[in-house]
Image (spheres, helix red, strand yellow):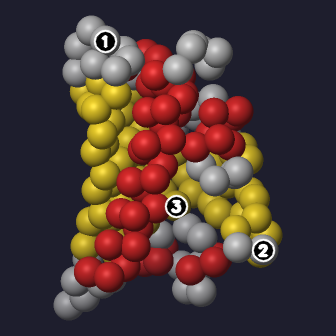
Amino acid sequence: MTESYVATSTITIDAPRGRVWSVLTDSVAIKEFMFGTDVVTDWAVGSPILWRGVWQGKEYEDKGVILEVEPEWRLVNTHFSPLSGQDDVPENYHTLTWTLTGEGDTTEFTLSQDNNSTVEGAAHSKGMWDSLVKGVKAIAERDSSVR
């Protein structure tokens, strides 16, 4: 039996859930917090989601499917990156779960990624997601240009 590790990053954001949700689903904000990535999706359950960009000098197109959408609370999607060097088969996909909790002007944002095959792989993913959640926080807490 193969082990599977989950990478989780959590941050407290001084902004209401609606504001954070707007940041998570806005293509301009995504490009900023997700390392220059362009996202293509309609955010509907069952729809594809594509992330395109350049990472360390290589063009990429990651892909997945939207599994759950509960505005201002939860987004779940699959994710596969050819940059992983793995075959594009279901067992090599991750599930990303984006969760928002809190009331009023404070939101706890958690991003988790399952199906990491090693502790080291999970730690690497956590490092990437730690950077991403900090980016979401920075955008959500500055003036509300993203709605």
Q: Which of the pair 46/41 is nearer the observer?
A: 41
The amino acid type of the residue labelled 2 equals Gly
> Which quadrant of the view contains residue 120?
bottom left
At 36% from the left and 15% from the top, the residue drawn is 16
Q: Is residue 64 above or below residue 81?
A: above
The tag on residue 105 is: 1
Asked if marks 2 and 1 touch (Cβ < 8 Å), the reply is no
Q: Is residue 147 above or below residue 75?
A: above
Mark 1 element type = loop
Q: Residues within 10 Å of mark 3 (few under 14, many from 20)?
A: many
The amino acid type of the residue labelled 1 equals Asp
List x then y, in percent, for residue 17.
37, 19
Q: Looking at the image, is mark 1 or mark 3 earlier in the sequence?
A: 3
Q: Which of the pair 36/114 is nearer the observer?
A: 36
Residue lying at the far bottom of the rendered structure: 1
- The residue wearing badge 3 is 79
- The residue wearing badge 2 is 57
Quarter in which the C terminus is drawn: top right
Residue lying at the far top of the rendered structure: 104
Q: Does residue 115 appear to the left or right of 85 in the view shown?
A: left
> Which quadrant of the view contains residue 127?
bottom left
Q: Residues within 10 Å of mark 1 (few under 14, many from 20)?
A: few
In front: label 2 or label 3: 2
Q: CA distance from mark 1 to mark 3?
A: 30 Å
List x then y, in percent, for residue 56.
70, 73
Q: Looking at the image, is mark 2 or mark 1 earlier in the sequence?
A: 2
Q: Does residue 27 appear to the left or right of 112 in the view shown?
A: right
Q: CA distance from mark 2 to mark 1?
A: 39 Å
